[in-house]
Amino acid sequence: MGSAVEIVLLGEVSARLGGRPVELGPARQRCVLAALAVDVNKTVSVAQLTERVWGDEPPSQSRATLHSYLSRLRQVFAGTDALTLDGRSNGYALTTDECAVDLVRFRKLRDEARGQRDDRTVVRVLDEAAALWRGEPLTGIGGDWAERTRDRLVRERDDAELDLLDARLRLGQGSELLAAISALTTARPLDERVTGQHMLALAQAGRVSEALEVFRSVRARFVAELGTEPGAELRRVHEQLLLGEEVVAVGVPRQLPSAPAQFVGRHQDLAELDTAMRTVGVAAIAGAGGMGKTWLALHWAHRNLHLFPDGQLFVDLRGFSPDERPMEPDVAIRGFLHALGLDANRIPADPHARTTLFRGLTAGRRLLVVVDNAVDAAQVVPILPGGDTCRVLVTSRNRLHGLVTAHGARPVGLEVLADDDATALLANRIGATRLDAEPLAVARLVDLCGGLPLALSIVSARVLTEPELSLAAIARQLEELGLGALDADPSVSVPVVLSWSYRALSDRQREMFALLGIAPGEDIGLPAAASLAGVSTEDARSTLRSLEQASLVTIDAGSRTRMHDLVRAYAAEKAKQADHEEALRRLVDHHAHTAHANDRLIDPHRPLIDLPVAARGTVMTQAADRAGALAWFDADRAARLAVQQAAAARGWNDRVVLLARVSHAYHQLRGHLDDELTMWQTAIDAADDPADRVVAHRIMGSSLGQVQRFDEAQRHLDEALALAEHVGDPLQLGDTHGTLAWLWASRSQFHRAIAHAKASLPHYRQAGNLMLLAMAHNNIGYCAAEIGELGQAREHASTALEIFLALDDRYGRATAFDTLGRIEHQSGNHTESIKLYTDSLSIYREEEDPYHTARALRCLGDPHLALGDHDAAAAVWRAALELFEQQGRDEEAGQVRDQLAGLPPGAR
């Protein structure tokens, strides 16, 4: 009786039982199955079914015919209990494992791929999704509904195919893709995303001139046929090809969480959103907690994806989280810039410059921005996109009057669900058959929950777990807990409903639920949750799934778990103080030890760190490679900051410093200097060991120097040097002198810089660290060249290069090539200088280091100019200027503009 069911919509409409095809009957009967399968496990009203099968003018006997079709389909599937066709009070539902429908499997795989950072995984998952397609969707059925749905599904397939091409292009597979992409450009000549992919594929195949010709041809068509220029992303690809730079696939952000599966009603609210998006472009949805604001925003967004071909951005501003401060707008902008494809090192250091860059990148794009849980208008205004082609949906518990008055946002006030919609929500969750048997109890449950979607969802989840209880008995239980007919006040209804649901949990589930309430951060990964509870990852996965089935948590495609803030506040009240402290210790140790293991993959040449023993029950993991390590750091970035703050609040000072140390290489690589400064300030405040204080002040000074806060940086480095001399550790002394050398060089005080660089040499020799010894020699060479002592400069830089070659340190070689290039240029050996600078530039690009790439490009222009090659100098300086502007390095950008202005007019 349990034969596996498969329903095929992505091709000819068909079905299989136990792997064998079944006969579904005539076309309209197949259409009935398809009309239910596209909304599997949801109620489809009789009116909707009729319209889908017959259109706007059904025959007079349509209802009787519909009953006949459904009866025959029930007979087709009578041999299995894995699928039922349920008659409900307001319609019908196809009830089965949702993954029995190939369309659902396709969408789950597509969403999983969009949540991945590793392109090989993206390709594997999207290949699996593509294999589900067997031709044109809904083949064999006709009518207006089928045509509309077919068109929508084809767009979904095409978007997934372009996502797959982007991932393969990022893996450098352009040569293999040329034929397929060329065919796409013929079919879609004005599609900028396809054109960008075509140019990238040609460039990767070594046919750059053809790629440039593609742009010229498309630009001419845009101007002639549309009266406009191509968009910013396509122009960026063109400019990078002109400069001979490596280019990456044009990114389309897709940050929306999945659509809510059990959405009902809200027709008037959806109509208001339609009007707002069509007119003013900004809508502010306001309502009490648990009212379904996020569900409404996501339902509208997913229903209108076709309006936003340039992507969708999403951010939870955490305005009402019980244990966290609301997110700063600048943090949201940084996340958006990453989603738009900017490497962290291309993001300016200055917050105002970041805002300007975001608005410039979004101007002219058809983007949707969903801003969830805003506390007030001041939190939203800085992250509004540029231009008038983007649309913005904002949710908040407060009415955002400032957004309405100053920016023309349309307010949409959300009230509780009407009784009919609340009943439909329960029917979708627990089935119409059970509701029809106890209509008075259903009415009482709806009344008790006050039409609040969050309370209704929790109640329905509990009903499903206790089928032996009548609905009347469940209503009585809620009344016994003190829940009367409410007016949708979540401060009353949700805690009572939660207490009732909590009582049904097992001891293990209760413990995990309570601990999730006190876990720092907005969400938590599976190994971290296992550490929190002191169980295996498999046990944690099982427990979290049980909590998800009870509608107490949500789990995304990346296996990260989060709670509604009202649920979280209730869970935190259940955490016992003693267990609470032990659990947080395990969580802190999980982050510290896992970060340390992954840090070694990111920067294996760093000195080893002595780790404290982890608390018993801590789960520790390590990625398979460097890409996996970066993905872990990316996913846990916000959680790691929150965990460090929690450790500091409890006086676990050694862990506070350790978390900052093991995050350092990641912050530098990604350019997250705001996180770096926050974590090291916390470390300074917490560190009580003198050696830890040396490290904390030294790295704080270095990070402040990177954002050009030189006076503050100097104070921290002076403190670090005094502490290092007191501690007497040679490595600490060498590092502090080395950092002071870098800071003085950044301020063009090269005599002081040389003194500190030379002072570091004996300490590094004593410590036996060859890599740092080589860096010190290179620093001396660089500074000596700047003050004209070329003999000394060449001697030290050459020594550095010899050590880096012996260590097989590519990044070290790049820095030495860079320094020797400057020395040869100042010596008049300009051709040799160009060769050395070009060698360093190649390594910086391969290492994905835009910060030093910009500097190398600027330096490369000098020997070109000295040889009279003005065009070459102009090309590399323009490339350097673009990077400096993107990174917010305004002083250096101004210097390059002056250099370009000094060139002959024809070369600029």
Image (spheres, helix red, strand yellow):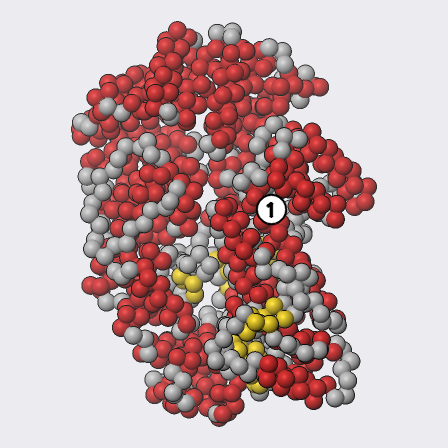
Position above or below: 109 against 550:
above
Disc 1 marks a residue whose amino acid type is Leu
In-front residue for pair 838/823: 838
The local secondary structure at tag 1 comes to helix
In-front residue for pair 413/147: 147
Residue drawn 19% across and 36% down?
A: 690
Quadrant of the snapshot with the C terminus:
top right
Q: How many marks?
A: 1
Among the 4 quarters of the image, the one containing residue 284: bottom right
Residue drawn 23% across and 57% down?
A: 617
User: Given the current orientation, which residue lies at the most extreme front position?
Assistant: 20
Which residue is labeled 1 in the image?
A: 165
> Is residue 649 visible from the viewing direction of this image?
no
Residue drawn 30% across and 40% down?
A: 661
Among the 4 quarters of the image, the one containing residue 483: bottom left
> Is residue 118 visible from the viewing direction of this image?
yes
Position above or below: 132 against 845:
below
Instruction: Classify residue 626 as left or right of residue 382.
Output: left
Instruction: Classify residue 526 as left or right of residue 376.
Output: left
The percent coordinates of residue 16 (x first, y second) are: 57, 72
The percent coordinates of residue 85 (x first, y second) are: 57, 81
Among the 4 quarters of the image, the one containing residue 790: top left
Instruction: Classify residue 572 as left or right of residue 871.
Output: left
Position above or below: 833 against 362:
above
Residue drawn 39% across and 67% down?
A: 545
The percent coordinates of residue 64 (x first, y second) are: 70, 89
Q: Residues within 10 Å of mark 1 (few under 14, many from 20)?
A: many
The percent coordinates of residue 513 (x first, y second) are: 32, 68
